[in-house]
Image (spheres, rainbow, N blue to C red):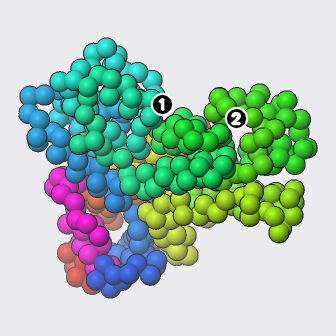
Amino acid sequence: MKKFNIPSQYRSPIIGKIKESRQVLDPKKKDFSPTTLDFGSVRFHIARHFGFCFGVENAIEICYKALDENPGKRIFLLSQMIHNPDVNDNLLSRGIQFIMNTSGKQLISWDEISAADIIVIPAFGTTLEILELLKEKGIETKKYDTTCPFVTRVWKRSDQLGKQKYSIIIHGKYNHEETRATFSYSKKNAPALVIKDMNEAIVLSEFILGKRALSQFKTTFEGKYSDDFDPSQHLENIGVINQTTMLASETQGIATFLKGVMEKKYGIENAKTHMANTRDTLCYATNENQDATHELLNKQADLAIVIGGYNSSNTSHLVELCEEKLPTYFIKNASEINPSGDITHFNYKTSTLNSSVNFLPQKDVVNILITSGASCPDTTVEGVLEKLLSFFPNSKKTEKVLEGL
């Protein structure tokens, strides 16, 4: 796999050592068991796959190249490049400005942007409408387009489905940048609809099977379908694609469920012509991180720490998996762990910050599961490890523990 030129502030000697040792032992990535660092009084069980993925490293390399190649010029990102506060704060400190926030709200007027400016497209991609607007302004977008290639693959698949006369069902979060972009590309060649979860898939199935009046469709899915979507015609042939950071198991579950709906309506022998096979739109990095988290949860542990940006979809899904099994704390970096023994952590369901006192159990050996989202730098994970170790003053030296890898 390609090696990217990533700024040193995102690299970690500790995490780098762990990843290098696993690469040597498991070059084909077949072993999803975690790495255990035994410090005596505390053991860290670290997921096999975590942190920067291919798409994120590609985006970071391109974005910092834009900074290096254009001294003195104004450089804009359409929105946050990735959902990580440490990375975005560093870019802001280097002079990059964000044109929109993550929900698409304008922060800088398009009237202030000119052909003399440098525009960087974030890893989530952007809509065809915004690309057209930039083209009209005479702005070159290809050179600093950091769109993840796995997101682009989803767009290509939606294009194929549209040309094959399938309607596109997008499993994603309505206001997520990637979903907005995927919706834009999908509706170019096909009627498109966004559903966020299995509950909405069940509602959709009731329209398909005639259990709900089609006259209710546009109210039920208001703001989530393309202008040309006619439920009397466009629910006959469908294909499911996804926002690549969603739970892979949920996307697969929705696709399997809707396939069963089509079998029920048209018969098993005819269902294939009404339901496209779209398993190939799932992101490898999302799958690996989620599979590694499932394996991580086989370890007996006292708590889990999941590290990443609070607006990171893929990170919140790792939290979702962990909290089903044990106490889980979703933190953005080490600053959320207080010397007093309290921890500030994010509740992704309510979008609120909570505080827990004395979150580390008082016992001879504490076992902690650790993973992070695909946009989380290794240095951030290292910082969390070191902060946690500060609560165990009699633990083994890090250098000694790493020798055993």
- What span is in magenta? 1-22
Would you place residue 198 above or below residue 248 in this image? above
- Around disc 1, counting alpha carbons within 10 Å, would you say few (fewer than 14), some (14 to 19), or many (20 or more)? few
Question: Counting residues from the N terminus, which is met first, the one under dot 1 or under dot 2?
Answer: 1
Residue 379 x, y percent position in the rendering: 26, 56
Would you place residue 245 above or below residue 267 in this image? above
Cβ–Cβ under 8 Å for marks 1 and 2? no
Which residue is the site of mark 2? 229
In this rendered view, identify the residue nearer to me: 405 or 261: 261
Q: What residue type is labelled 1?
A: Ser
> Residue 103: which disc?
1
Whether residue 324 appears in this view of the structure is no
Name the quadrant of the C terminus.
bottom left
Q: Which amino acid does label 2 sit on?
A: Phe
Q: Residue at 75% x, 34% y: name it.
A: 230
Whether the magenta-drawn stretch holds residue 14 is answered as: yes
Whether residue 60 appears in this view of the structure is yes
Nearer the observer, disc 1 or disc 2? 2
Q: Residue at 30% x, 33% y: name it.
A: 77
Q: What is the C-alpha distance between the residues marked 1 and 2?
A: 24 Å
In this rendered view, identify the residue nearer to me: 402 or 278: 278
390 with respect to 316 (left or right): left
Residue 88 x, y percent position in the rendering: 30, 39
Residue 278 x, y percent position in the rendering: 60, 60
Whether the magenta-drawn stretch holds residue 208 is answered as: no
Q: Residue at 78% x, 41% y: name it.
A: 233
Q: Residue at 80% x, 57% y: name it.
A: 262
- Around disc 2, counting alpha carbons within 10 Å, would you say few (fewer than 14), some (14 to 19), or many (20 or more)? some
Residue 89 x, y percent position in the rendering: 27, 37
